Amino acid sequence: MKTKSSQSASALILQVVMFIIAIIFLAPFYFLLVNSVKSLGDIMVNAANWPSMFHWDNYSKAWELTRFPEAFTNSLVITVISNLIIALLSAMAAYRMVRANTVFNRIVFMIFVSAMVIPFQSIMIPLLQVVGWLNVNNSMVGLILSYLGLGIPLSIFLFHGFVKSIPLEIEEAATVDGASSYGVFARIILPMLKPMLVTVIILNSLWIWNDYLLPSLILQSPELRTIPLATFAFFGQYSKQWDMALPALVLGITPIIIFFLSLQKYIVEGVAAGSVKG
Amino acid sequence: MNSKRTAALMQQLVYIGPALLFFGITIIIPFVMGMYYSFTNWNGVSGNVEWVGLDNFVKIFTSDRAFADSFWFTTKFTIVGVILTNLVGFFLAYFLTKKIRGRNFLRTIFFMPNVIGGLLLGFIWQFIFIKGFATLGDVTGLAFFQLPWLGDEVTGFWGIILVFVWQSSGYLMIIYIASITNVSKEVLEAAEIDGANRFQVLKNIMVPLIMPAVTVCLFLAISWSFKMFDLNLSLTKGGPYGSTESLAMNVYNEAFLNNRYGLGTAKSLIFFIVVAVITLIQVRLTKNKEVEA
């Protein structure tokens, strides 16, 4: 039997250890923020100490040189539009596949699920050719189109599991009242899918917002650059000029950090719900 | 009767058609094309595509040193990365499900690196490794910080591992937390009353009960680390001299740097097969270990 005092001592040690680990986790952000407002000379002398002088103009320079507002808008437009279409189409397909459980639909579902294993690198080379054929290369349309196909399998998989848990009786009652299948889906099913909708949108948002490889292959024009693309181009140009590169990095991560901190409850729940075993 | 069938067909088309169409255009067609191209000498530009049979595969397996090296690098990275992220993720979850002050705050911190994309994280860490570690080395005199970080093969490998673990263990932590919270307190208490020590409870009761989460976390960690690209690109670019080049980057370079698209698609096909086989085996193996609570 453990004594009370040894228990509280170990609890205290655990508490301290966890906070030390948290500080280690946060340390990179300290280095990033502190050095982003130093002069280059200051950074070179000592990267760990507090700034001797605050050079806020580092930020205004980085803001302009990365064309941050433009990159932010591009990222936002691409993420929002892709998300809406992926969520709607996946919910519809998953609903139909659960309710009309035909051999054909079971095979289609199997294909969707199996496709989740395909690494992006295994299709990226011919995908560019397809995008070229459709004449949507170097455009947001081409990029969003690619995100649709890539995002749909996991989203369908998640919705599929969720629709199965919705009792059929609710729909039957509505059908008796004369609602069409589409009416039932739009007015009854879609609202009930909301918890899974949140999960799907969060997982897809984190992925699309942060994705670098696909946009780098499809978008060539500088004015179409997303945040990762703009950061990459900027970092290549100013790689040793940390007083430029660091504020650009801070700007780059700020939107997603704000998104996370304001929605963290949903994000954490979404991650847990999105990982249900398959 | 006939109109009923048309209506059903219509519904099928409306509900599944669009998803299937986009999926077909961006996954199925490129996937099938890739299989075809892997047997050709396509260079990506000219319309001149010649069938070369198994030439690409013979070349890859017999004379492509860089591919073999990147395969070995990726394998090592996957083994070390999967073990470390899962250990860190699990133990963070294990301790954060105990009575501890600031639990939610701590969870937020551990998860936060995960919402930032690999590319930006890599750039941030490039600064930490080059300038931050150098300063810490001067201040503390610890040899760990004075290594030539990212400058040679060994520090390049461990540098990417470090950032990978920092980035992904928070995600796995969330999954482990959800699973640990579901383990009934009575079972654990009963074991303790029966005289099991903390380690025995952990090993014999806790881990078997959270096996479904282990399956998922291993699956995720394997696919992340095996397909790792962004961190690789932003931290070492595969250097020095290709010594830290991952498979995904090798495929990328073959196609878009060397303009050997045929060879690149052959490599990507091998890449797909390896990923599929590994993940299937892993899921099969760990699923067998799952028990009913």
Image: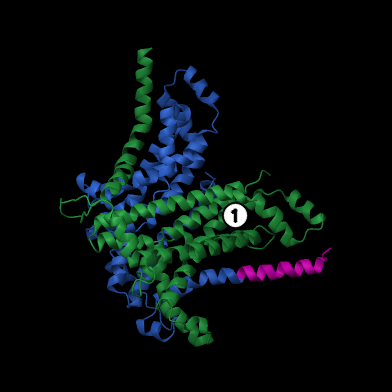
Chain colours: A blue, B green
Residue A194 is covered by the magenta coloring: no
Q: Does residue B116 show up?
A: yes
Residue at which label 1 appears: B176
Number of marks: 1
Q: Nearer the viewer, residue B40 or B26?
A: B40
Give coordinates of residue A97: x percent, y percent.
44, 31
Categorize mark 1 by other alpha carbons within 10 Å: few (<14), some (14-19), many (20+): many
Give coordinates of residue A23: x percent, y percent.
56, 71
- Seen in the image, is A254 located left or right of residue A25? left
Write the residue at 81% across / 58% down. B195
B277, above or below A66, in the image: above
Q: Does residue A251 show up?
A: no
Q: Seen from this angle, which residue lies furthest top?
A: B1
Q: Which contiguous range is marked in magenta?
A: A1-19
Quarter of the view holding residue B293: top right
- Amino acid type at image mark 1: Tyr
- Seen in the image, is A201 located left or right of residue A215? right
Write the residue at 43% across / 36% down. A109
Q: Nearer the viewer, residue A112 or B122?
A: A112
Q: Nearer the viewer, residue B67 or B79?
A: B67
Residue A15 is covered by the magenta coloring: yes
